[in-house]
Image (cartoon, helix red, strand yellow):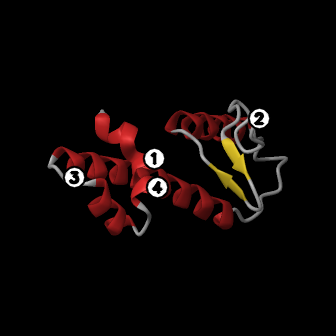
Amino acid sequence: MPCPCVASSIDSCSRGGDHQMRHTDADLDRASQRFEQLADDLDATTVEAEHTDDLRAIATAAEAVATDQARLREAVALARARGRSWNEIAISLGVSRQAARQRFADASAA
């Protein structure tokens, strides 16, 4: 089922008790471009403006999360390249060794 947050994404959300979005950088770029197009199409003479500070805060936080996730993947890959074990990495993350390996094994191989 397509994610309601990004019209062009397919199966990009994991659904459980709460709704967590897991979008790729490309998904976020497409959503941003779509937003920019919608903003460009607005007629300032006919549109009533509402405060969007809360939505801007969400977009800023989402961008920061994507950036931080990329930095975390890079840090794990570097630690693995330097010979750190999955157990050591897991302790740093506060998760099990298996969870760390499942989440980051592909990133560290790249």
The picture places residue 46, in percent across and down from the top left corner, at: 85, 47
* Alpha carbons under labels 3 and 4: distance apart: 16 Å
Q: What element carries label 3?
A: helix
Q: Which residue is drawn at 55% across and 55% down?
A: 62
Total of numbered circles in the picture? 4
Q: Is residue 108 left or right of residue 39?
A: left
Q: Which residue is drawn at 72% across and 45% down?
A: 5
* Alpha carbons under labels 2 and 3: distance apart: 35 Å
Q: Do labels 4 and 1 touch, CB within 8 Å?
A: yes
Name the N-terminal-most of marks 4 and 2: 2
Residue 76 image label? none
Which residue is under mark 4?
A: 99
* Alpha carbons under labels 4 and 2: distance apart: 27 Å
Residue 2 image label? 2
State which mark lies toward you, 3 or 4. Answer: 4
Name the N-terminal-most of marks 2 and 3: 2
Name the N-terminal-most of marks 1 and 2: 2
Quarter in which the N terminus is drawn: top right
Which residue is under mark 3?
A: 79
Name the N-terminal-most of marks 1 and 3: 3
Which residue is under mark 1?
A: 102
Q: Foreground residue, 59 or 80?
A: 80
